[in-house]
Image (cartoon, rainbow, N blue to C red):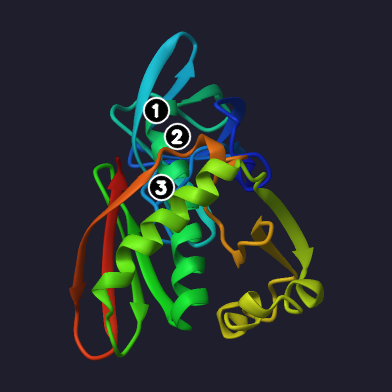
Amino acid sequence: MEALYLKDCYVREFEATVLSVTDDKFVVLDRTAFYPKSGGQPYDTGVLISDGKEYKVVFVGKFEGQISHEVSEPGLKEGDKVKGIIDWDRRTLFMNYHTASHILSAIIHNETGAKISGNQIAEEKTRVDFNLENFDREQIGSYEAKVNEVIDRGINVKIDILPREEALTIPSVVKLKDAFPPEIEEIRVIRIPEIDDQACGGTHVKNTGEIPHIEIFKAENKGKNNRRIYFRFA
């Protein structure tokens, strides 16, 4: 299966062939631009069209290495030709949030040395978790301002798919070395020059200037050395 979003996050429509259908609703294609739920980013929605009939895509997940599209009604079968159309408003929102979370995470790390332990993107807000002993709430306003400054600079965001050996020379990627099994020969790196280089399989904007300004509206302790920041678009 070819995951089109890995090289180009701006593919909105595509044509594909149905490889398999399970239980009349779980559809695997030979290629797809639909992003499956993973890495803290929600799945894409949209439609598959075959012979003039639309099948709503209500969930997309990755199972045993295959991206599965759950459709709202039966009818598709192996060998069918389909056109896929992404719900672009939803995708754009998540791209904006995901790239903004990379910027925020990089700023927190550079300011405090904290390691980012996770993130969760949603339609109304996004959270970033990080390991930090002391939580200086007065710094939070500065994080927000620095993220918005990066947004205003309009920095081009690059996607590099690098050989494993080359990717593991990047300090931020080395920290995730154990997350890449030996059979992984290439690593996808999202690069925001002078800000962040991070291994990531998610979808991102082409330029930070596309992202709305963020607003950090909540910060909380989640246990020993576990801190959480919530942000949304202002």
Q: Which residue is mark 2?
A: 92
Q: Which residue is mark 3?
A: 97
Tell me if 69 is positioned left or right of 219 in this view.
Answer: right
Picture quarter containing residue 74? top left
Instruction: Pick whichever, 219 or 143, lies toward us.
Output: 143
Is 230 situated above or below 139?
above
Amino acid type at mark 2:
Thr
Picture quarter containing residue 54? top left
Q: Residues within 10 Å of mark 3 (few under 14, many from 20)?
A: many
Q: Quadrant of the C terminus?
A: top left
Please say if the residues under marks 3 and 1 sit with CB atoms less than 8 Å apart. Answer: no
Residue 62 in view in this figure: no
Residue 112 in view in this figure: yes
Q: Residue at x 50, y 58 (%)?
A: 103
N-term-proximal mark, 3 vs 1: 1
Q: Residue at x 57, y 61 (%)?
A: 200
Amino acid type at mark 3:
Tyr
Q: Residue at x 61, y 29 (%)?
A: 16
Is 121 situated above or below 110?
above
C-alpha gap between disc 3 and disc 1 = 12 Å
Question: Where does residue 178 sit, x and y in percent of width and height?
Answer: 58, 85
